Image: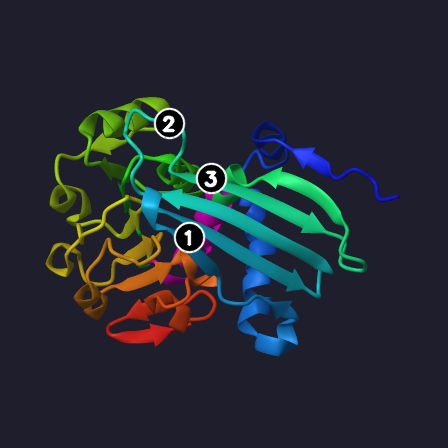
Amino acid sequence: MSSVPAFLSAADVQDHLRSSSLLIPPLEAALANFSSGPDGGVMQPVRTVVPVAKHRGFLGVMPAYSAAEDALTTKLVTFYEGHRTTSTVPSHQATVLLFQPSDGSLLAVMDGNVITAKRTAAVSAIATKFLKPPSSEVLCILGAGVQAYSHYEVFTEQFSFKEVRIWNRTKENAEKFANTVQGEVRVCSSVQEAVTGADVIITVTMATEPILFGEWVKPGAHINGRPRPSPSQAPPFAARTISISLSGLMQPFENSPCSRLGGTRAIRRGGLRS
């Protein structure tokens, strides 16, 4: 008789992943294996997305197998656009299932929200390490939700910025962020104010229309974008003068611009750079 699968709550996962920086070495190895194609031993089909049109939602199914770790897992994530700001239910909810590769038995059911937040931020940090301008001094965060906090955590652990700025559509949430995190954060009244002169920009908003424009961004700046089902926070022409990494490229959405790019890539001056 099969044993009962382990269950790890959000608190359990947080206890095991107290710092996003712990994820960087294994994620760097995973990204390298993924980018190596068949030789890397990673089997990861394009993410399947089921629209829940009646409720303005999506269900994403993201399976993967890594031969190097002999690990078989699936992430299930729901994303709902129509949540009220007063709702206690997160717009994104995730669960991770871990299987025994040898026989398919379910080993564990894990809360995926903490994993998602920390993994996304850690991959952004990896891209930034290779793509940011030398001697970067100013970090800008657009958005003040869960991903803003996780990105701030790992970016302040991994890099030494002299100034951190934040903008959010609801200024009260940006002020709450600045008052909650450790370290000084400047709250900006507009996106243009926040990004002007910034060396590294993180876009983690729920925007459905472009909020960031290329003429506001200094040449050589690096942008980390966390895409929705279709990336929408920065217009395409911004890629002509800056570098952009999309943290969702490890799990591209079918029929989206991301589905045409495998692995972690960046767009620099109009071309793809791996």
Q: Which mark is residue 32?
A: none
* Nearer-N-terminus badge (3/2): 3
Q: Name the dominant secondary structure of the magenta segment.
A: helix
The quarter in which the C terminus is drawn is bottom left
Left of 45 or right of it: where is 230? left
Structural crowding at the residue carrying mark 3, measured as other residues with C-alpha within 10 Å and reported as few (<14), some (14–19) or many (≥20): some
Q: Are marks 3 and 2 in contact (CB under 8 Å)?
A: no
Q: Would residue 164 be visible to someone looking at this image? A: yes
Q: Which mark is residue 124?
A: 1
Q: Are marks 3 and 1 in contact (CB under 8 Å)?
A: no
Residue at image x 34%, y 35%? 145
Q: Amino acid at mark 2?
A: Val
Residue 19 x %, y %:
54, 37
Residue at image x 47%, y 39%? 93
Q: Label 3, on which residue?
A: 93
Is 119 in the magenta? yes
Left of 43 or right of it: where is 47? left
Left of 59 or right of it: where is 267? left
In this view, the mark in front (3 or 2) = 3
Of 241 and 77, the residue lying toward us: 77
Question: Residue 257 appears in which quarter of the rendering?
Answer: bottom left
Structural crowding at the residue carrying mark 2, measured as other residues with C-alpha within 10 Å and reported as few (<14), some (14–19) or many (≥20): few
Q: Label 2, on which residue?
A: 181
The quarter in which the N terminus is drawn is top right
User: Bounds of the magenta span?
Assistant: 117-132
Of 137 and 24, the residue lying toward us: 24
Is 133 in the magenta? no
**Does 17 sit above or below residue 248?**
above
Q: Amino acid at mark 3?
A: Gln
Left of 205 or right of it: where is 128? right
Residue 65 x %, y %:
65, 62
* Nearer-N-terminus badge (1/2): 1
